[in-house]
Image: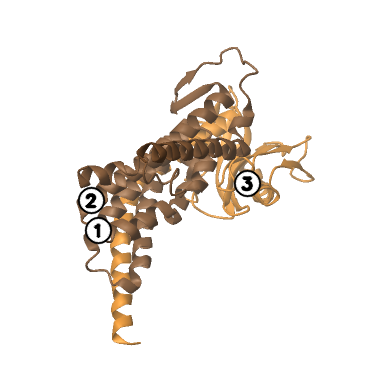
Chain colours: A brown, B orange
Amino acid sequence: MNSKLQNLTKGFWAENPILISMLGLCPTLAITYKVENALGMGLAVLFVLVMSNLIISLIRHFVPDEIRIPVFIVVIATFVSVVEMVMEAFVPNLFARMSLFISLIVVNCIILGRAEAFASKHNWLDSVLDAVGMALGFTMVLVFISLIREALGTGSITIWGDLAINFNPNNSPFFSSFYVSPPAAFIVLGLILAGSKAITAAKEVKSK
Amino acid sequence: MNKTTFKYALFLVAICAIAGLLLALVNKVTAPVIAESRQKALREKLEEYYPYEYYLQGDDGSNDVAENAVQAFYYAFNENKELEAVIFQTSFYGYKSQIISLISIKVDGTIEGARMIAGNDTYDLSDFDFEVDEETVDDYEYTIKAGMTKTSEGVVNGIDAAVSYFKSIKDDLGGVSYE
């Protein structure tokens, strides 16, 4: 496969930050009770990851090795602060629900991990492609988990703001608020991780 | 300090300065929007918690960012444009953030209610109800059903500040009109 395409797509499955590397599990468990939250977090991580990978890749030859981690943290924290200000201004309700976890993007291992493992060693284009792939892989899993939790927990899916799909007009007892509770986050994530491991194992057996 | 350490420190200072500049630029764009949306949210909360016909801000709002104080107050009027209550916006420290509250005191000195409207303490756990039973500013006790103890302290301090402020302006309320 073309290396550029590989940089973009490896985050979808082969090096998916949640399913394979198991990074960024804190927001994954905490905010996936609503699809809107998952999309908001995904967009925030996409912006921070792309911008920090781009800047770190561009300045990598000038940054002394001994202080690279503090420099990476400053770059990442700057873009996280930008995201916080923009979200508070333009999507205040979403920001009120997620502000704690938006701040925690600064110490999200996916972002610092990609800065250290990839952006500091590759050119800007590869770094941006890597960032886009990783952020999309992260977002896809967040949305998948939140789809299951919100649909089973409330009988509706809130896509963004007032845009929602309600398939439980009669308040059926089939839908339980348990699914939007924190323990359900562990259970759903555990089942998804087990499923992804099973698929990976089956692929390996097939390739042999 | 050796030369290398000084070079590293200088590099970090330069990076921080660039980051600060970028944040200042973004803040310049977003700050007015944030202030406007907070004002809108405040108005909605005023109308939801203390539904009166007309409201009039009692000051110029210049104290809006003050912490551990009464930030602003609003006169609330009935349909005949008669003054019914004074609603105070207070900000006091809770568990880990400033807790913004709206405390309404009727012109006769009865405490109508106290509601938390904003704060960055743990989301959803810091909601609470303030129970008032015809308490007056001269002799009041309150019962608070709270998910979080430290958060409610922010409101309790707000009530005390609002009562104190109300007493200081009470004698001038007769001259307040909506026109």
Q: Are marks 3 and 1 on the same chain?
A: no
Q: Are marks 3 and 2 on the same chain?
A: no
> 10 Å neighbourhood of mark 3: few (<14), some, or many (≥20)?
few
Q: Is residue B176 left or right of residue B13?
A: right
Q: Quadrant of residue A73?
A: bottom left
Q: Is residue A205 left or right of residue B16?
A: right
Residue A126: which numbered mark, if any? 2
Amino acid identity at mark 3? Ile
Q: Viewer-nearest of labels 3 and 1?
A: 1
In the picture of the structure, the residue carrying the numbered disc 3 is B169
Is label 3 in a helix, a strand or a loop? helix
In the picture of the structure, the residue carrying the numbered disc 1 is A57
Is label 1 in a helix, a strand or a loop? helix
Q: Could you give the CA–CA distance between mark 3 and mark 2, rounded to whole angstroms?
A: 65 Å
Query: B58 and B97: which one is in front?
Result: B97
Q: Earlier in the sequence, mark 2 or mark 1?
A: 1
- Asked whether the viewer can see residue B39, the reply is no
Q: Could you give the CA–CA distance between mark 3 and mark 1, rounded to whole angstroms?
A: 61 Å
The residue lying furthest to the bottom in this view is B2
Q: Quadrant of the N terminus of chain B?
A: bottom left
Q: Viewer-nearest of labels 3 and 2?
A: 2
Where is residue B132? Give x, y as percent: 75, 37
